[in-house]
Image (cartoon, grey):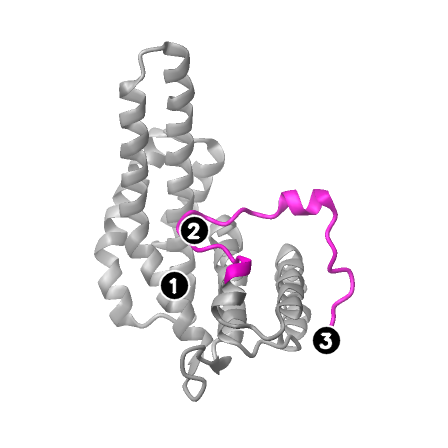
Amino acid sequence: KKMSGTKKTRKQETQSPAPSSSGQAVEKQDLKEFQDPEPGKTQELYAQMDYILDRVNQNNFQQSMKAITEFTINTEARLKSIIHLIYERALAQPASSVVYANMCRCLMGLKVPTAAKPAVTVNFRKLLLNRVQNDFENMARNSREILQQKQEMVDAITKEEERQRLRKELEEAKTEGRRQSLGNIKFMCELFKLKMLTECVMHDVIPRMDQYYNQIVKIVKNRTTSPRITSMLQDVLDLRK
């Protein structure tokens, strides 16, 4: 079913959160890779899902889910891309992680044939948890590598003006890394509360969460980041109480 009003204005497009560096963007080559027989309709599906994610909240949640269940999500490419869109919003908007986690719970039973073996199916829950867990494991390492590269660039520059510019980029990279880690942790906590993440998985990640927790406590206490990020980090600390 085609939703009305799926076309966005230029202003609305610029307000949509950009994909994080930890995830793979939904691009046209995905359609080619999975041999999507209807790429035009698939792109329309992405636009409709993006439209819903721009507006979904607790008040219109049921209406939004009804619209999503009417989508034709029948290929692995489409299912992975729907997961990507929801997950990226959860990272970009930690304050709305409850809404996105509940959306995932409603879709957890959705399954489609795999691209490699059409006789075998894969479900939403498995693909989502693979994405969340892999990102959690890779995020800290990737962030350290990026920060190290930028720090080396700063150290190698002799001109003060250029050093200041690179220092600013370094601080922005640190803030982005914190935002992604924050969004991932909050989203995992909400999925666990909805019993979508098993205790076994959580036991594996809790030691690393403890490390993040200690770092977050220091950041909040010393106020070494912006007030907005500090407030978001405090929300994460409150989840543990």
- Disc 2/disc 1 C-alpha distance (Å): 14 Å
Q: Which quarter of the rendering shows the N terminus? A: bottom right
| Secondary structure of the residue carrying numbered label 2 | helix
- Disc 3/disc 1 C-alpha distance (Å): 28 Å
Residue 195 in view of the camera? no
Residue 201: horizontal and vertical position, in percent? 27, 68
Q: Quadrant of residue 68?
A: bottom right
Residue 36 in view of the camera? yes
Stretch of the chain drawn in magenta: 2-29
Give the foreground label among 2 and 1: 1
Residue 22: horizontal and vertical position, in percent? 39, 51
Residue 121: horizontal and vertical position, in percent? 43, 84
Magenta region includes residue 12: yes
Q: Which residue is mark 3?
A: 1
The residue furthest right is 4
Query: Which amino acid type is shown beneath numbered disc 3?
Result: Lys
